[in-house]
Image (cartoon, rainbow, N blue to C red):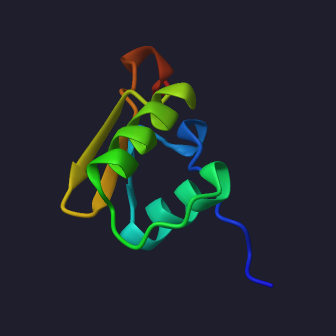
Amino acid sequence: MPRPFVFPDPNDRSPNSPSFIVSSTQVLGIYKQYSGEKMERVTKKVQDWFCDKAKYYQWDEAIFSGNQCILRVKMDKRELPED
């Protein structure tokens, strides 16, 4: 049995790596797991659902570029370690 898809966690990001690219395979896998509906393509319906889910998981931005989704967290300068 394949591993389940996990929605990326924005808390795993750092100031040096505030973004995460979700492949079309991951987008469709996550969509199927949560909705139960199998889709073969990343449609507008899937994109809208995925962006809403990204907001729910507290990502600051979810932008589709083709069939991939770029998730981004805005890092506050207060979170940077002091020298």
Residue located at (73% from left, 82% from top): 2
**Which of the 4 image quarters holds residue 80?**
top left
In this view, the residue farthest toward the bottom is: 1
Residue 30 locus on image (x, y percent) = 57, 58
Residue 82 against residue 38 in the figure, above or below: above
Residue 77 against residue 69 in the figure, above or below: above
In this view, the residue farthest toward the left is: 66
Residue located at (61% from left, 50% from top): 35
The reply, left or right, for residue 24 in relation to residue 26 is: left
Residue located at (37% from left, 68% from top): 24
Task: Report the quarter where the N terminus lies.
Answer: bottom right
Residue 81 locus on image (x, y percent) = 50, 27
Residue 77 locus on image (x, y percent) = 37, 19
Residue situated in front as seen by the camera: 76 or 64: 64
Residue 63 locus on image (x, y percent) = 26, 43
Residue located at (43% from left, 40% from top): 49
